[in-house]
Image: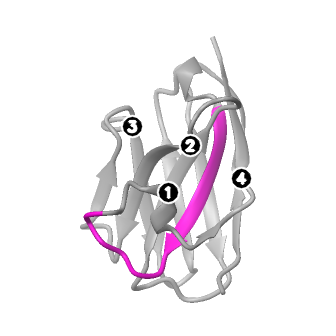
Amino acid sequence: QVQLVESGGGLVQAGGSLRLSCAASRRITTYAMGWFRQVPGKEREFVATVIWSAANTYYADSAKGRFTTSRDNAKNTVYLQMNMLKPEDTAVYYCAVDLAPSIATMMRGDAYDYWGQGTQVTVSS
């Protein structure tokens, strides 16, 4: 089992930046670490994932060019740096771990095994 704890959410003005962190309770070196977000009443949405190393990162179209995910395996932590934030980025952001990562399924929430509690990101216009 893996416990995940997100932090770093908050209120920011449009155009601003936030960095989310997700600390895992054990080694995550070989796993995929994904970021998803959800707005009440809407489906959970894939944002980004990093598989094995920083060389294997993938982003939703809405995140490309603005968000960067990275991992520090020594700290069992992944990050989501979010720049040029827009009001439509407002959501609860979740990190998740996929113990058997696959490029074919990395954007699917049901491929991930454990989830954090979520952190609220609010972007004001």
Q: Which residue is mark 3?
A: 63
Disc 3 marks a residue whose amino acid type is Ala
Mark carried by residue 44: 2
* Mark toward the start of the polypeptide (4 vs 1): 1
Q: Nearer the viewer, residue 102 or 78?
A: 102
Quadrant in which residue 29 is drawn: bottom left
Q: Which residue is mark 1?
A: 109
* Mark toward the start of the polypeptide (3 vs 2): 2
Q: Nearer the viewer, residue 97 or 73?
A: 97
Identify the residue at horizontal 56%, vertical 65% (top origin).
Answer: 96
Question: Disc 4, disc 1: CB below 8 Å?
Answer: no
Disc 4 marks a residue whose amino acid type is Gly
Identify the residue at horizontal 31%, vertical 35% (top origin).
Answer: 61
Q: Is residue 31 left or right of residue 1?
A: left
Question: Disc 2, disc 1: CB below 8 Å?
Answer: yes
Query: Which type of secondary structure does the marked residue at label 1 adopt?
Result: helix
Span shown in magenta: 91-104
Q: Which residue is mark 4?
A: 118
Gap in Å between the C-alphas at discs 3 and 1? 17 Å
